[in-house]
Amino acid sequence: MRSGRLWPVHLTLGIGAAAMVAPFFWQVLTSLKSFTESTRTPPTWIPSWQWSNFAKVVEDTPFLQQFGNTVVMTTGRTLAQLLFCSMAAYAFARLRFPGRDAIFIVLLSVLMVPSQLFLIPQYQIVQELGWLNSLPGLIVPGMFSAFGTFMLRQFFLNLPGEVEEAARIDGASPFRIFWSVMLPLARPGLLALGVLTVLWSWNDLMWPLIVNTDPERMTLSAGLSALQGEHFTEYPVLMAGSLLASAPIIVVFVVLQKQLIQGIAFTGSK
């Protein structure tokens, strides 16, 4: 196709890209405005460069504690999902046991149920265990997912059976085959699931907002939502805090985006 005929495609992609970037651009501008500028009509395009908004969100809120809570929650959920989902996925893909396909269909049916329906029973369980306002209350409900199991199962289905058979002939146990042979071969899938879990956990708002109400026990997403007052919201400080909270996850995505795309593409190959 001639380059001259591509201009409608380029124009469409350019408009779509601008629409996607515009909210982030406005967030950056708002974080550098004074409160008066942020509420002015018509809006102020050139901010007065209030860099103090970034210092204010750190000084006026338990930002560092909430950042630490978010890091611990994200790390715990990600490591647990990689372990438990890979074990379940390997069993569904490679092992033979009665009712395997029926159990897997029941597991997949969980994906069809809105996650909001699980909030009340999960909250009651966490409350009975005394885990409200604690890190286990944040981490444990997110340690396993049907999506992660389904995703890794597709990887294990695509791996060559000859490697597994050779290990079995050498006398390796099923767990040894899984841990030492098959799991390293599923590294692209593990990396893709890890990145997706990090993104999901870091941005998770609903569950942390329900289970932890103590400001020093909150995650960043829940803590920033608490900055929105009923009658007054200091938007520049809120936007500055949102930028600081988004920075680590943007870095993770930029660094690992190639592996993430490869992993997702490989998942759909079978």
Image: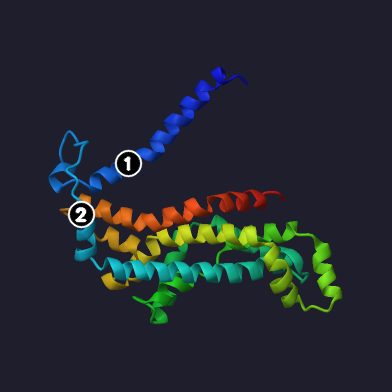
Residue underneath mark 2: 53
Q: Nearer the viewer, residue 174 or 113?
A: 174
Q: Is residue 228 above or below residue 68?
A: above
Q: Marks 2/1: CA distance?
A: 17 Å
Residue at image mark 1: 25
Seen from the viewer's position, the closer of residues 174 and 130 is 174
Locate residue 151 relative to residue 251 in the image: left or right. Answer: right
Colour scheme in use: rainbow
Position of residue 138 in the picture relative to residue 61 (left or right)? right
Graded by Cα atoms within 10 Å as few (under 14), some (14 to 19) or many (20 or more), the crowding at tag 2 reads: many
**Residue occupying the point 47% across, 73% down:** 140
Location of residue 60 in the rendering, given as x and y in whole percent from the top left corner: 19, 64
At a point 63% along the width and 21% down the height, the residue shown is 1
Secondary structure of residue under mark 2: helix
Local crowd at mark 1 within 10 Å, few (<14), some, or many (≥20)?
few
The reply to whether residue 159 is visible in this rendering is: yes
Q: Amino acid at mark 1?
A: Phe
